[in-house]
Amino acid sequence: MESRRIKIVPLDSIHDKFVVKWRNDPDVSINLFSNDILTLDSQRRWFEVYKNSDSRKEFVIYTLDDNVAIGTVGLTDIDMRNLKAELSIILGEKEYRGKGFGEEALRLILDFAFENLALNKIILKVFKYNESALKLYNKVGFKLDGILRQDIYKNNQFNDVIEMSLLKEEWNKTITNI
Ligand SMILES: CC(C)(COP(=O)(O)OP(=O)(O)OC[C@H]1O[C@@H](n2cnc3c(N)ncnc32)[C@H](O)[C@@H]1OP(=O)(O)O)[C@@H](O)C(=O)NCCC(=O)NCCS
């Protein structure tokens, strides 16, 4: 799947080393709910489980002009009974942040979720302190569902978590307005 400056390709075992590097980076891991330090071995084992799972679809984001892998975007807990899934995104290569690549990647995965998988609702959870992610999610149309107060213990404190969602009907309105 491609947009103006990026493509997203299905996650493969060749990406294990990138995932380990990105998820272990303190600038990224501070925003993740998991506290695990990854190793190449643990990531290889995770990938073997992932590839046999139907409830999760992960993609790697590549720039089109220089073919650099810059991050991941994906859907977890894909629920075909209620037609919903949870979104996640990481731009691991810092020099590519704040330049609209995250927004492009979200638009591609949302198109995949609502058009290819025919889902009805995408949800996400984000720490209240993650301002750049919150701005990005607001920008593409996510709406606040609620605040889970002091939900995740991380960095020696209990942190509030924001829950947001985007419905297919809202997405359809956004894309006809572009
Ligand atoms: C959150 C993240 C995916 C954003 O991606 P990005 O490519 O940097 O964001 P974009 O450049 O597409 O920006 C989209 C909007 O987000 C906001 N934004 C982006 N970077 C920002 C920053 N450093 N500070 C404040 N707002 C920012 C802006 O409002 C921007 O809109 P604008 O272009 O109209 O100003 C990226 O910073 C990242 O991977 N962070 C670490 C991992 C993470 O937090 N993932 C989310 C976990 S829930």
Image: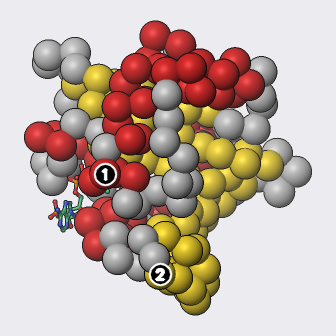
Point out the quarter of the image occupied by ligand 1: bottom left
Which amino acid type is marked by label 2?
Answer: Gln
Q: Is residue 116 above or below residue 10?
A: below
Which amino acid type is marked by label 1?
Answer: Pro
Who's the residue at 58% across and 89% down the image? 149
Who's the residue at 35% across and 31% down the image? 21
Who's the residue at 41% across and 41% down the image? 23
Residue nearest the observer in this picture, 171 or 127: 127
Q: Is residue 106 visible?
A: no
Q: Is residue 13 above or below residue 50?
A: above
Mark with earlier residue (1, 2): 1
Residue nearest the observer in this picture, 78 or 12: 12
Quadrant where the image shows the N terminus: top left
Query: Whole-percent x and y of residue 22?
Result: 35, 37
Q: Left or right: 16 with respect to 65?
A: right
| Residue pointed to by mark 1 | 26
Q: How far is the residue under mark 1 from the one under mark 2?
A: 17 Å
Q: Is residue 18 visible?
A: yes
Residue lying furthest right in this view?
A: 81
Quadrant where the image shows the C terminus: bottom left
Q: Is residue 168 above or below residue 150?
A: above
Q: Is disc 2 placed on a helix, strand or loop?
A: strand
Residue nearest the observer in this picture, 177 or 156: 156
Residue nearest the observer in this picture, 17 or 105: 17
Q: Left or right: 83 with respect to 13?
A: right
Query: Whole-percent x and y of residue 169?
Result: 59, 63
Query: Whole-percent x and y of residue 45?
Result: 66, 22
Q: Is disc 1 placed on a helix, strand or loop?
A: helix
| Residue pointed to by mark 2 | 157
Query: Whole-percent x and y of residue 162?
Result: 51, 78
Color scheme of the displayed model: secondary structure
Q: Is residue 105 above or below residue 120?
A: above
